[in-house]
Image: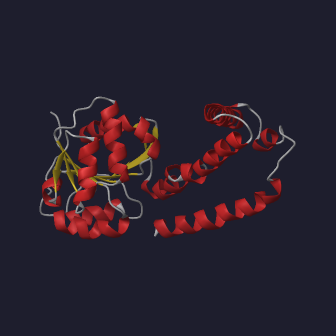
Amino acid sequence: MKKSLGFIGGGRITKIFLQALANKKIELSSVLFCDTNMEVLNALKKQFPKILLTDSCKLAAAQDIVFVALHPPAIMETLEQIKTSVSDKTQVVSFAPKISIEKIKSKLGINNVARMIPNATSYINEGYNPVSFSDEFPVAEKQHLFELLLTLGKTFEVEESKLEAYAIVSAMLPTYFWFQFKEMQKLGVQMGLNETESKETVQQTLLAAIDLFYNSGLSNNEVIDLIPVKPIGDHEAQISEIYQNKLMSLFQKIKG
């Protein structure tokens, strides 16, 4: 039996999820979306004309599977608002760090709760998405939900205690590098390559460099030693310190 889907929150991750479904030609006409900001909902509707919109989170929460796509500070208040709309058969999936399965179960009074750390690369169905389920989640229902989540890319079950680490090391990982990719493409053009040449050069070299780092059989240091000239080597310690300070601080914050 086909499950009805409801989304509470119409931001970035909802758009990513929708695009992943659209890429796989999955019907969107029965998916209901709620957000308190109608501009956000209208932007979603413009990109995905077949979806259904509502300003009632209670109505979205009355669906079979409910995805909570909100920032942590807004979740508990929203759960309080929708708790009379869910039933003991409702499956709730939170995309947020910090707010535990146990807290969600306690607030809603239901057992079928899961948490997933989504990944931006799910936009092209190549996500790397860890998911945790409550102990009481029925096996058959878990399998059905898991198959839906596989639409996003690689989806795998993990201990809930590890989800915040995946948020830092995976979900946010591209943000640590994308601006550098952009800068290198810009430099390539400044040095005489056209935009296509520069983009392809950076892309292909990065793909090969990742493959070399992880699949060559060499140690990390042996790979690094393959290129003797390191133009920004003098700044590596400073960059490493930034990673340590910023990311560990953020991890402790979202770990609660």
x, y percent for residue 132: 38, 50
Q: Is residue 146 left or right of residue 81?
A: right
In the image, what residue occupies the spot 77% across and 40% down?
A: 219
Q: Which colour style is shown?
A: secondary structure
Nearest the viewer among 216 and 228 is 228
Q: Is residue 155 visible?
A: no
In the image, what residue occupies the spot 16% across and 59% down?
A: 55
- Quadrant occupied by the N terminus: top left
Asked if residue 45 is positioned above or below residue 81 in the image, the reply reads above
Quadrant in the picture for residue 25: top left
Q: Is residue 31 visible?
A: yes
x, y percent for residue 217: 74, 32
In the picture as drawn, the residue positioned furthest to the right comes out as: 228
In the image, what residue occupies the spot 34% across and 39% down?
A: 19
In the picture as drawn, the residue positioned furthest to the top comes out as: 25
Q: Is residue 132 left or right of residue 232?
A: left
x, y percent for residue 72: 37, 65
Quadrant in the picture for residue 50: top left
Nearest the viewer among 147 and 121 is 121
x, y percent for residue 80: 20, 69
Asked if residue 99 is positioned above or below residue 173 in the image, the reply reads below
Nearest the viewer among 51 and 90 is 51
In the image, what residue occupies the spot 32% across and 63% down?
A: 102
Q: Is residue 189 left or right of residue 150?
A: right
Tally of marks: 0
